[in-house]
Amino acid sequence: MNQRQQRGWLGRAFLSSAVFVIIVAIGCTIPEVRKADKLAAQGRWDEAVEAYRQAQKKAPFDPAIQTALEQAKARAAEQHYTEGRRFLKENRLAEALSAFKQALGLDPSRSEHHAALHDALRLKEAHTQLQTADKLRGLGRLEEALDAYERACWPRSRASPHSPSSSAPPPPWAAPAPP
């Protein structure tokens, strides 16, 4: 290779390297990335997710931004899941449902997020059935009240406590089965 060819090759290599460095530097200097990193360091995961999403709009093919976004989403989801569990312990069902929905929306791959939302929805249904049963009992409609109490205790997803295929014990108020 002569000297002129060598300079041309080196010039192209330098130019390619410079373009690569500039692209990487742009990714690192996007203000939204700096903002997101700062928010993440403070544990403000929902805001960090939003900032990483904004950065991703400016650099959609940057793998570092994609990785940071996924990590922030996972941390935000865990934060919402933990809040949901706390809300359930405090008997704040509406807030728990909201927190579990947010966790599931941020990280749908986690089975515990699905289970927590399902359990909270079942608990909400049980509360509704108990309220209905109490109203029916107050109106003297005892058979309907009994059915509502049973639905509160044995969700629809399981067999009726009176069906032969059910493994659930009958409720204490149920009459024994005839011999």
Image (tube, rainbow, N blue to C red):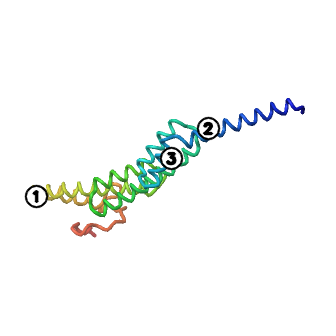
Q: Which of marks 1 and 2 is in front?
A: 2
| First-in-chain label (1 vs 3) | 3
Q: Which mark is residue 69?
A: 3
Q: Could you say which quadrant of the image residue 8 lies in?
A: top right
Q: Mark 2 points at which residue?
A: 23
**Label 2, label 3: how many angstroms apart (C-alpha)?**
19 Å
**Label 1, label 2: how many angstroms apart (C-alpha)?**
72 Å
Type of residue at label 2? Answer: Ile
Type of residue at label 3? Answer: Leu
Q: Name the residue under label 1.
A: 138
Crowd band around label 1 with a 10 angstrom C-alpha radius: few (<14), some (14–19), many (20+): few
Helix or strand or loop: what does disc 1 sit on?
helix
| First-in-chain label (2 vs 3) | 2
Q: Which of 38 and 116 is in front in this view?
A: 38
| First-in-chain label (1 vs 2) | 2
Residue at 32% across, 55% down: 96
Residue at 24% across, 69% down: 172
Helix or strand or loop: what does disc 3 sit on?
helix
Q: In this view, does 116 lie above or below 60?
A: below
Q: Which of 86 and 138 is in front in this view?
A: 86
Q: Nearer the viewer, mark 2 or mark 3?
A: 2
